[in-house]
Image: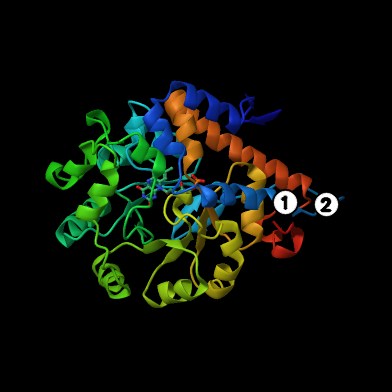
Amino acid sequence: VLSKGGETLTEDLDDYRSRAQSVAEPAAWDYLAGGAGAERTLAANVAAFRGATVVPRVLVDVSAVETTVEVCGTRLAAPLGVAPVAYQRLWHPDGEAATAAGAAATGTLMIASMFSSVRYEQIAAAGGSRWLQLYVLRDRAILLDLVTRAEAAGFTALVVTVDTPRLGDRRRDVRNSFAIPPHAQSQNIDPATMALAGIPAPGGSALASHVDATYDPGLRWSDLEWLAERSGLPVVLKGILDPADANRAVDAGAAGIVVSNHGGRQLDGAIATLDALPAVAAAVAGRVPVLFDGGVRHGVDILVARALGADVVLVGRPPIWGLAAGGAAGVTGVLSRLRAELELAMALAGRPRLTDLDPAIIRRAPR
Ligand SMILES: Cc1cc2nc3c(=O)[nH]c(=O)nc-3n(C[C@H](O)[C@H](O)[C@H](O)COP(=O)(O)O)c2cc1C
């Protein structure tokens, strides 16, 4: 049994997941759990970790395990962050405020979604380290306004998501004619801009209509240079899978990148993120931090991703399982559990420092 600060952590992530599913409204659960198309990439993200094993060393002094890191000026207790997830009041009345409180309590990075259902200023009130994620809308004035607000509220970096020129074909949302109910709508962007997200489109996804109407599908590298120049905050690009794009991102002034396929929610058939990571990390070659998400469900997954080149690992769905199951305490439970599992895995692998983790300790089975 793992413990943290004298408190026993009996529940693991699967327990939080089942509790979350039993309390969530079915369409909101499908929106959380689902991916695009046949959900091949969603499954591949998790399968890639199953196919990666660690070769432990023995008789190493592991009486102290060291997990702290710094990323883009943000100091963290562990190489762990909460990935941006939109509309969190779908799963708990406290929404993003509770997620931020759980992240702050555990020294975890909180990346708030542009489409938060709680005001950014209220997320900031939870304390802790916070970054804000943005999509580039056709209306650039909205973007610049949000950048100003983020700076004022003490968000210390911007994460621009670049894998969503259109929305992936999320079959479950289409089947459910899913739309964002009034209680979970965005509290940060004017209602006219957000209107389509809340209007059920029978036989379709309201989110897809919203994305078609508001996101800029013509976004190019020069737009990102424009934003990086205008923002006083570091700009991190989320959704990079190709080493050439990683290079391009660094040239365009990105302060970091996130290796991500959006949790299998965009291109179904896209490469699993763990499979993409080594080549992207090699291309970046330490010039900027490499963040990673997709399929991380155990502490040892964080160890594996670190060894294959990630500086910081993000989790998307797991904190929401904690949120739905138990509000801020549930988020704290999930994040403490992941950190305790990471520390145990590092000790049992005979690698007590993050710098001990490199590709040579991982074996990957062909799938
Ligand atoms: C319900 C849901 C909503 C999401 N909303 C956003 C978002 O607003 N912005 C964004 O960049 N990514 C969003 N993502 C993607 C996550 O940030 C992250 O890339 C993905 O969930 C990581 O995979 P994991 O869930 O397997 O950890 C969302 C994911 C989920 C499951």
- Asked if residue 100 lies left or right of residue 183, the reply is right
Q: Earlier in the sequence, mark 2 or mark 1?
A: 2
| Residue shown at 70% from the left, 63% from the top | 358
In this figure, which residue is indicated by the disc labeled 1? 352
User: Disc 2 marks which amino acid?
Assistant: Val
Residue 313 drawn at (x, y percent): 54, 52
Q: Which residue ends up furthest to the left in the rendered image?
A: 192
| Residue shown at 63% from the left, 41% from the top | 298
Looking at the rendered structure, the secondary structure element under dot 2 is loop
Above or below, 228 against 214 in this view is below
In this figure, which residue is indicated by the disc labeled 2? 60
Q: Which residue ends up furthest to the right in the rendered image?
A: 59
Residue 215 drawn at (x, y percent): 24, 57
Residue 99 visible in image? yes
Residue 102 drawn at (x, y percent): 45, 34
- Dot 2 surroundings within 10 Å: few (below 14), some, or many (20 or more)? few
Q: Which residue ends up furthest to the top in the rendered image?
A: 23
Q: Is mark 2 within 8 Å of ligand 1?
A: no
Q: Give yes or no for contact between labels 2 and 1 (Cβ–Cβ under 8 Å).
A: yes
| Residue shown at 26% from the left, 54% from the top | 151
Which of 315 and 40 lies nearest the eye of the viewer? Answer: 40
Residue 66 visible in image? no
User: Disc 1 marks which amino acid?
Assistant: Pro
Above or below, 54 against 108 in this view is below
Above or below, 139 against 120 in this view is below
Q: CA distance from mark 2 to mark 1?
A: 8 Å
